[in-house]
Image (tube, coloured by chain):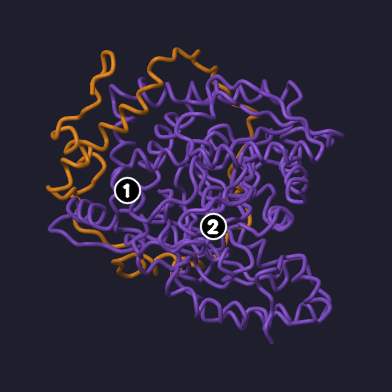
Chain colours: A purple, B orange
Amino acid sequence: MKIDLENLTIKKAHNALLRKEFSARELVENYLAEIEKKNPALNAYLEVFGDVLEQAGAADEKIKKGDTSLLTGIPFAIKDNILIKGRRAGAASRILENYVAPYDATAIKKLKEAGAIFLGRANMDEFAMGSSTENSAYGVTKNPHDETRVAGGSSGGSAAAVAADLALAALGSDTGGSVRQPASFCGLVGLKPTYGAVSRSGLMAMGSSLDQIGPLAKNVEDAEIIFNAICGQDLMDSTTISEKTYPAGSLPEKFIVGVPRDFLGEGVAPEVLKNFEAGLKKLEQAGVEIRDIELPNIRYSLPVYYIIMPAEISSNLARFDGVKFGAKISGSNLLEDYLKTRGQLFGKEARRRIILGTYVLSAGYYDAYYNKAIAVRKMIADDLKKVFDSGVNAIATPTTPSPAFKIGEKINDPLQMYLADIFTVTANIAGIPAISIPSGFTESADKKLPLSLQLQASWGREDILFEIGKKFEKI
Amino acid sequence: MANGMICYMLKLEEIEKLAKLARLEIPAEEKETLRKEVGEILEYIGQIQKLSPQEPPKEAGIIHNVFCDDKGPHQTGEFTDALLANAPDREDGYIKVKKIL
């Protein structure tokens, strides 16, 4: 049975499964056929699991018994840095060659309980460091909209999989934009939840004060369904928040969206700005008030991010030493084991960020970089709080300063690559939720490249993002 | 590449020292590129030097015990095999390393 995967959403699939229009088995067979056809060119999956049909069989059993949730039988791609018990997980790094996850990430446990199906593990930038998936040790993921371009990163495999109908939805992780930016490049919805909303247990740590697992999906409603399934306080992650952590508010009759105009000029492609202005018009048509706002320190988000993040990476990646897990290159003594294993099995970008992090944390520079960045981080969060306290419900920017760039275009210029995160890092620095929503296309050499609008809301207010997002989608 | 009083370009020896501290063997031909790239990134992130933010007050938040209660322990050895299976070298239920002293 041929299923129209292109127009399928979680809600539609769920209804069709319940109405027995197709079974979970037929659904995954359709996805597996697409994977076989398209994955060799796209390289979205590093591995397609061998037991997908068994998983579908179990979902069909649940459906037969009437024991279902919205996600029962829904096929997911899972980023390679999220642990699924008994399966390989490698963060697309050679240093984790042969690593098998000994436990489930909390988000995975919740998806399993909901009856979701895992199709395979998705490609990514090594240890989630990058904006193009070019830093994967297993080759770049190509953008389904134009295979000469990157799918974005670091959750590029997750994004390409959903965009090319190789999965109905995906999990990624977002440390500075790694869910939202690839979602934007591939024409999907991507959500970075409030820091602490989704447990980080079983997510390989990159920047522990910044990381969040988030969904990549075909529309806002699907992203909301996944978020509701994976969020919640967790004993295994002491930074998770409860429903009481941030005051819940009601939804306003008329939403106010703020635009930090001063921040939107330099380095942003003209077609992105044009599309953004059109997006604001659409929001107005949907009854949203647009208001200019000032965020004087937002321009420091990216430099602050590129201090805090490498600092946390240099500590977090210290655990990969060829002793406890993964691969090892043997030297003539223990020190050489470390030097060779880490030097040869970490990729270039990982080594670069470890060096940078070691520098900003070293004696003599700690105050000038790390401590100062922590202080500026607070200033940025205070600016945001002031704006939200003034009645603004959400802040709008483009998700990225350009559409998907060419493979190879920025790989030898790390600073240029980092600038791709200019609009997304703020939400991670402050810990607020942010969503990227498709806002149309720009044309380049006969190819239509997706563009997106980013909305950021106050701590714990994903509900506002979903509401405005759904209004935006309708117009 | 100097910006005010701070020079962001590192010396090759500094890159070597950082690599040693981070336990990374960097291939000789990569050191110069790394020196240049790290210098450019440091210059970019150095722009926060011109800010004089107030040191944020040290906040502890609500103090609570983040550790699991010490009760209902699992059987000794229950997870040993699963965890050790990922170690590159092991012997008799231990992780094996080269001699330390």
- Amino acid at pointer 2: Lys
Instruction: Give the vertical position of A133 relative to B33 (above or below).
Output: below
Location of mark 1 (residue): A349
Q: Circle 1 — which element? A: helix
Quadrant location of residue A197? top right
- Amino acid at pointer 1: Glu
Residue nearer the viewer, B7 or A51: B7
Q: Residue visible at 48% across and 44% down? A: A402
Alpha carbon distance from label 2 to label 1 = 30 Å
Quadrant location of residue A363? top left
Question: Mark 2 or mark 1: which comes first in sequence?
Answer: 1
Mark 1 surroundings: few (<14), some (14-19) or many (≥20) residues within 10 A: some
Q: Residue A463 location in percent, x, y?
A: 76, 43
Q: Circle 2 — which element? A: strand
Quadrant location of residue A254? top right
Q: Is residue A266 left or right of residue A471?
A: left
Residue A434 in view, yes or no: yes
Q: Label 1 lies in what chain?
A: A
Residues indicated by labels 2 and 1 sit on the same polypeptide chain = yes
| Image quadrant where one finds the N terminus of chain A | bottom right
Q: Residue B80 location in percent, x, y?
A: 45, 66
Q: Residue visible at 62% across and 43% down? A: A453
Instruction: Give the vertical position of A308 relative to A180 (above or below).
Output: above
